[in-house]
Image (cartoon, grey):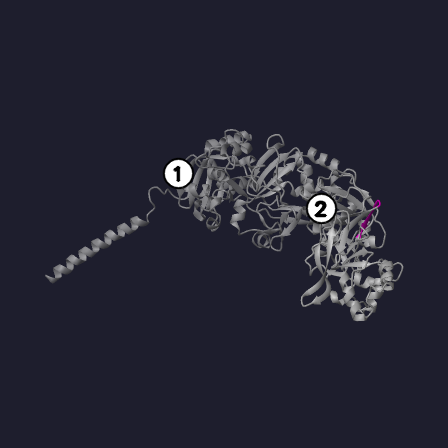
Amino acid sequence: MKRLFIYVISVFLACTYSCSKKELVSHYERPDWLKGNVWEVLDNRKEFTIFLKAVERAGFKEILNGKTIVSVFAPSDPVFLSYLKDRNLSSIDQIPIHELKKMIGYHLIYYSYDKNRLMNYQPQGSQNLQPAFAGLYYKHRSRSQDSISEEMDVTDGIVKKVYHKDRFVPVLSATHFQTKGIDAKQNYEYFFGADSWSGTTGFNVSNAGITEYDIPADNGYVYVIDQVIAPLPTVYERLDHSTAYKDFLAVYDRFRTYTYDEQASMNYAAAGESLFLVHHGALPAIASEWSYNGESGTPDYANLGDLSYKAFNVFAPNNQALSTFFNQYFKSYYPSMKEVDMLPLAMMLRNHVYAGNIVFPAEIGKNPDIKTVDGIPIVFNTQSDVGDKAIASNGTFYGLNKVLIPEAFNSVTGPVLVNPKYKIFMYMLHNSGMFKTLTSKDIRYTLLIPSDEEILSTLYGDSYIFWNEGNPFVFGDEEVQIQNNDGVKVAMSQRQQELFVSDHIVYDDITSLSAAKVYRTRNPYNYIFTKNGNLYSTATYNSNEPVSVLPLAGNWYNGKSYEVAQTVLGETRTIKFTLIGAETSSNPLNKYAEFSKLLAKAGMIDAGSSLSFLFGNRFMLFAPDNATVLSGLAAGLIPTEKTALAEYLKSYFVSVSDNSIGDYPFPGFGVQGTWNTTRRTGYNLYRQITLMDYGTGLSLEDSDGTHISIVDYLPQVFNDGAVYHINKLLKP
């Protein structure tokens, strides 16, 4: 009985094992719906023979045969035959191998994507950050690539081997257009022609529609397409293929530079060779198959978000439009466009590129995000202003019959951009970021422009200004310099250049030099004066040396521009130490020499610590002239004892910062009020005076109600304050 039980158990276990093995094998067997790898799937269908032959000849069979995962856009034999016929070819064997490799590679994209993922593609990790961007990541890395080429680098005269990275193929889904809020058919067919959109419930890939979606394979998905996809060129190549835009491209190529690619050199170059990538310096890298970090020339290998989302949209003026632009702005100063300085050219070129997502015509002038590299909205008529258009592997191309002229060319900065005699000042404006400020349409300006010659004769601090022209083939190699304490020429800092140009930027139109008037400059507490047909900086006014000015012709939309015969920097001298030598006839404060003597008698000025009670603050001095002081002394109105005299004299000084005064008072400025003088009368108590602005003049009111007129309409402004002329004494 026991043996019988063991036998039954053994039979049961054997049956159980056998059944489990069958189920296990069945579980891991390929299901009926999975027909094999991509090569097998296409081969079994018998309608992709030409495509498969081309794949094999181009060297991609292993990829389709299961070496890696892939998504394939496959044209059927009739579609491929039509492609060959249109090109008068009878066989793919007539296509050069490098061209065939590039073309077939464009039908193979990295990784496996089903229909839903392609329609709503977002790179790994971006879904949580930008969920509203579904479908806007429209580019996919293909296996298409140009061969290594050799190019002459004009910046150093050395031939560079240029590596061309894999091209991207655009997959434009219905979701993409829905997310943008624009009509898919209208905008797609703007580029690809009538009746080319078939992706209402899916997508088009480049110029091809999908006739069959989501054919599964072991190593990816197959999509049957209705056209062979021609490898899209870059935007740069698209421009290069048309003679109508050769002048624009020639200007763009003045910025062409080459960056060593260490990774590509390690992976793809022959032993000891260096491979380079092409970009265009400060301009968007429209020749690059891939994007660059910050347009710095560093290739972005890892950021799939940028690679799949970003595009260079180039709005290129044709040759005639560029010629008209040159004739209007530069012809008087340059023999041809190739001689024009690179900075105004860079500004013009940057006004024709939007480096964001791909731009369709329905978005032009309506999407506020579509701006130039410098933040200027891009607006033109997508029908009447456009002669050519195309989608490229790295963006879009719109061929325009006009130039999108940067606002800086028609603002008060216009003269510095077109006339080479103002080159240094132009670069100072650029380096300090002032061009954007000076294109405002909300503020009126007068720009006072010194020539290069005048700037180079300017003493800035303890050194003259120098100009380093740099390499004429490298933009940004120029440099404004000064000499440091060691006698070495060093670059002026951005802040130094900003302060320099700000002295030359006037808030308001200077339409006449005849009236006595004060104008604010961009530098606080520094001003430009006009009087009797002359113009003065604060420094030249103190020296009574007017600055010669020449109005510059042009219809500037936001003000006036003048050439000045010298730089108009602020006064570097101080009131404190100018008063010490006031008795000298050439001293700008000579008419206050008697007041200076009172200060000396009171022990308030000397060569070491002049007016130390002011603690370095900016201040206003309401100074009685020599005759007023002498008559006051004769009448006994001025204390003679040293301490009492010092306290009395402090009544004439008002600290700007202690009274929170943001501007010196001038007639019409509206800067008025009751202020504490520097004379202390008790704990936290000060003698006060009141200043009133009558629009045409200023007046003081003493603590006892005495009114004292400010004699001169224009005070004298120094580095540490302003001196106002009075002819009546304050009460003791």
Q: Magenta-highlighted stretch: main secondary structure?
A: strand
The part of the image, by quadrant, that contains residue 241 is top right
Residue 639 position in % (x across, y down): 81, 67
**710 left or right, relative to 19:** right
**Looking at this view, is 585 or 154 the one in front?**
585
The number of numbered badges drawn on the structure is 2
Indicate which disc, 2 or 1, sits on the residue closer to the N terminus: 1
SS state under label 1 = helix
Disc sitting over residue 600 in the figure: none
**91 left or right, relative to 732:** left
Residue 423 on the magenta segment: no
Mark yes or no: residue 365 visible. Answer: yes
Q: Which residue lies under the disc numbered 2?
A: 343
- Residue at 53% across, 34% down: 187
Residue 115 position in % (x across, y down): 43, 41
Mark yes or no: residue 582 visible. Answer: no
Amino acid type shown at disc 2:
Leu
Q: Tell me where the magenta segment starts and ends, as one range.
A: 532-537
**Looking at this view, is 195 or 525 the one in front?**
525
For label 1, the crowd category at 10 Å Cα-Cα, with few meaning under 14, some 14 to 19 and many 20 or more, is few
- Do tag 2 and tag 1 residues touch (Cβ < 8 Å)? no
Disc sitting over residue 44 in the figure: 1
**Looking at this view, is 87 or 465 the one in front?**
465
For label 2, the crowd category at 10 Å Cα-Cα, with few meaning under 14, some 14 to 19 and many 20 or more, is some
- Residue at 39% across, 38% down: 44
- Residue at 55% across, 31% down: 87
Query: Please, is residue 578 above or below residue 98 in the view?
Result: below
